[in-house]
Image: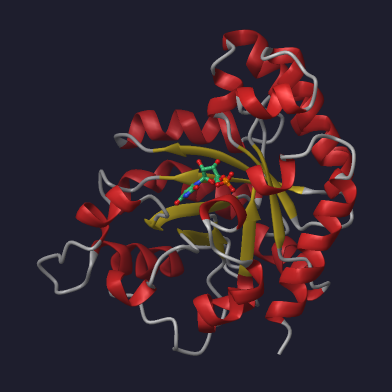
Amino acid sequence: MTVSFGTRLASELAAKRHLCVGIDPHAPLLSDWGLADDAAGAERMGREVVAAAAGVAACVKPQVAFFERFGSAGFVALERVLADARAAGLLVIADVKRGDIGSSFAAYADAWLRPGSPLEADAMTVAAYQGFGSLRGAFDRVREDGKGLFVLAATSNPEARDVQQAVRADGRTVAQAMVDDALACGHPGDDHVNSVGVVLGATLRLEDFGIDASAPPARPALPVLAPGFGFQGARVEDAAEIFGGFGWALLASESRSVLAGGPIGLATRVRDRAEAVATALTV
Ligand SMILES: O=c1ccn([C@@H]2O[C@H](COP(=O)(O)O)[C@@H](O)[C@H]2O)c(=O)[nH]1
C-alpha cells in the first residue's frame, strides 16, 4: 500500500511544521524582487521560495493562476518549481481549485495528482459545488497513489458566505457538509491525519458557517489549509484561538506577507513565520 498523504502530512506536523508558504508571483511582487513580470520571473521567485521553505515549512502552495497567466511558458516554469520542491522534500499543494462533472474532474486529478505527470503535486485544492460525488475521480488518486485533497469549505473571501453559509435540506450549512464529507473520504492508512481535508479561511468566524471548532479533533484529524494569515489580516499568533480543535492538523498559509520585501531576508521571514505558528499551536 502506498504511504498516504495524511501520513506524510502527519510527519510534518509532528515535527511542528505547520507553515504553508504560498507561491503567488503577483506582478507588483515580481517588481519588488527586481524580476520581470513573465514566466522566467515567476520561476525564479518560485524556486527561491522553495529553497527558503525547505526543512522549515511543511509545504509550499503555488497559486497556479499566477503561472497560468503566462500560458505554456508559465506551466513550464511551474513544472520546474514543482520539481525543485519534490527534490527538497517539501509537500506541494497545487492551489488550482478545480471542480467539474465527474469525467472532466478526473482529468484534472490526472493532471495534478497522477504520479509522473509533469505537474504532479502531493495534493490539490478542489471545489465540490457540483456535488461532493463529482470529486470521485480523485478518490482513486488518494487511495492508490497517496495523494491529498483540500476541499473548499469556508473560504476567506467575503463574497463566499452567500453560498457557504447557506443551509441545506438536511439542516447543515454547505460549509459543514464539506467538512463532514471530507472527513468521510481518505486513505485506509490514515491513522493520525486524514488525506482529504478542507480549506477554512483564517479571517472568518467559523461559527458563522455552522462549523464548531470547539469539538476535539477527530481521529484521523481533518487537515485544514488556512489561507488568510498575513496580508489578509489574520495573525498566526492567534491560530489556536481561531481554529480550536482544528489546530492539531492546521496548515497556516501566507503568501504576500512572506514574499513582500524581495529575496533578501526571505529565509528569515519564512523561519519567523514558521516559529510563530509552531509556538501558537503548541499546547
Ligand atoms: O479561501 C481562500 C482560499 C484560497 N486562497 C488563496 O490563498 C492565497 C492567499 O494569499 P495571501 O497573499 O496570503 O493573501 C492566494 O493564493 C489565494 O488564492 C485564499 O486566499 N482564500
- In percent of width and height, residue 170 lies at 14, 72
Q: Is residue 130 left or right of residue 255?
A: left
Q: Is residue 47 above or below residue 222?
A: above
Residue 36 falls in image quadrant: top right
Q: Is residue 12 left or right of residue 141?
A: right
In this view of the protein, can residue 218 be seen by the observer?
A: no
Residue at x-position 70% and y-position 78%? 280
Describe the colour scheme in one phrase. secondary structure
- In percent of width and height, residue 283 lies at 71, 90
- In percent of width and height, residue 266 lies at 85, 44
Residue 111 falls in image quadrant: top right
Front residue of this view, candidates 72 and 27: 27
Residue at x-position 39% and y-position 67%? 179
> How many numbered circles are shown?
0
- In percent of width and height, residue 272 lies at 82, 62
Residue at x-position 60% and y-position 75%? 238
Front residue of this view, candidates 223 and 107: 223
- Farthest top residue? 72
Q: Is residue 102 above or below residue 60?
A: above
Q: Is residue 205 above or below residue 162?
A: below
Position of the N terminus, as image quadrant, is: bottom right
Residue 167 falls in image quadrant: bottom left
Front residue of this view, candidates 234 and 155: 234
- Farthest left residue? 169
In this view of the protein, can residue 143 be seen by the observer?
A: yes
Residue at x-position 89% and y-position 55%? 55
Q: Is residue 38 above or below residue 184?
A: above
